[in-house]
Structures are given as C-alpha cells and as structure tokens.
Image (spheres, rainbow, N blue to C red):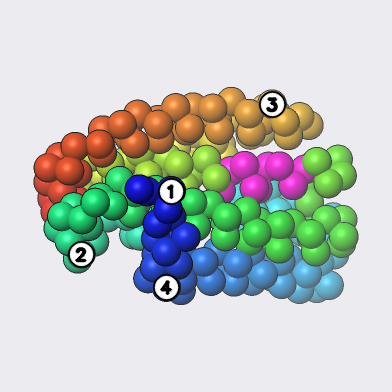
Amino acid sequence: MLPRIAPALAAAQLMRVRSAGVAFPVALGALIALAGAAASAVAGVPWTRVASVAFMPLYSLAVGMGAVALLSGDALVELHGSTPVGVRAVWTTRLALLVLAAAVGALVMFAPLHALGVVYGDIGWASALSPVGGAVALALAAYAAVAVLESPRAAAFCVVFAWMALSFFWDPNLAGDPVLQRAVPLAVALTAASGAWLSLGSPERACAKAVGAR
C-alpha cells in the first residue's frame, strides 16, 4: 500500500517541512556563495580560498542540525503512528526531501565559488562531491541519532561530533580525492541510518522515542 500513497505522502511532508527542510538549505547555500563572492571582491581570491576551508563546511553542519529539528519533537507523532503510513515512513520521507534540498543547496553554494576560483583544493567539478556528500552524510547521521537517542540535545551533540570528525580530521587528509573523501563517510552514515530505519519498524518504539525527544 505504501508505494501507492508515496506521492501523497511526499506532497504532504513537503507542505509541512518546506520552509525548514527545503527552502533553508538552498537559501543557505546561496548566502554562503554570496558571502564568498563578497569576500573575494574585498579581500582577494587567495585569502578567500584559504577562508573557504572554514566557511564551506558550515553548510553541512547547518543541514545536520536542521535535520535534527525536522525529525525530533514532532507534535503529530502519535497521529503518524496510528495510521498505516507510520512514523518510519514519515521520517524517511522528510529525510529524502531534506537530502534532495541539501544536495541542491550545496551545488548552489559550490558553483559560484568554483567559478570564482575560491574553493580550496579545487580539482574541478568533481570537488562538488565534497559539499554535497558532506551535507548528505550529516543528514543521514541526524536521522540515525534522532531515531536511537532519547533527546534532540543528544542527537544534536552527535551531529556536531560527526561534523567535527569529518571537517577537522577526515577531510584535511583527503582533500585531493573527493571520491574517497566522501565514499567512506557516506557508507558509514548510510549504515547507521539503515539500522535506525530498522529500529523504527515498531510503531510503539518509534512513538516512544519521538515523544521522548520533545
């Protein structure tokens, strides 16, 4: 039955999360690109290229924190749990919408900065895998954290920890290989999200966790 109602479910969740889950990532990507362009005009390309190491990763952190906000503390969680759709389908649909919007926002951020030549370690359009993959990995990590942990604060802490590990330890050592740089974190995040998806299969457990996360 779920495949038949998937379009309606996606449309309903799009209406519910459109500002925070869809408009925010795209607008943030555009804002970071605008800030980078302004910095390039004022301070020059070399300085902005170095500064991009600091400001571009903030996009993936914002996406991860936004995912925590979208998935935790849902006021309608009991209603979702009482329908044939279930909490798991609702949360997964929201995650899918956020992932799509996050990927678009990352491209909106990367394209102008790439054209200006201010992306640090830029090796061409393949470098877009870094912001796109980072945002997707943090969104998946947020999904897993919210599903498993008891509070949005704990989930947010896990997302921040994952972002720090990615930005300060993993990425600097693989800056010249965007495919490997993102393949491993995405594999780990997808595995964690898959486990979380399985854990949300019980309606009672899903509702208990969601209510406790408020």
Q: Dot 3 corresponds to which residue?
A: 180
Q: Amino acid at mark 1?
A: Pro
Q: As shown in the figure, which amino acid type bears the numbered disc 3? A: Leu
**Vertical relation: 200 (above or below) 54:** above
Tag nearer the camera, 4 or 3: 4
Q: Which residues lie in the magenta part?
A: 127-135
Q: Secondary structure at mark 4?
A: helix
Q: Earlier in the sequence, mark 3 or mark 1?
A: 1
Sequence-wise, the earlier of marks 3 and 2 is 2
Whichever of callouts 2 and 4 sits on the residue coming sooner in the sequence is 4
Query: In whole angstroms, how far apart are the C-alphas of marks 2 and 4?
Result: 14 Å
Q: Position of residue 37 (x, y in %)?
A: 78, 69
State which mark lies toward you, 3 or 2: 2
The residue at 44%/27% (across/down) is 191
- Name the secondary structure under disc 1: helix
Left or right of residue 39, residue 11 in this image = left
Answer few, some or many: residues within 10 Å of disc 4's Cα (few below 14, many 20 plus, some between 14 and 19): few
Name the residue type under label 4: Met
The answer for how far apart the CA atoms under marks 3 and 2 are is 40 Å
Q: Residues within 10 Å of mark 2 (few under 14, many from 20)?
A: few
Is residue 152 visible in the rendered image? The answer is no
Please rate how many residues cluster around mark 3, counting C-alpha atoms within 10 Å: few if below 14, some from 14 to 19, many from 20.
some
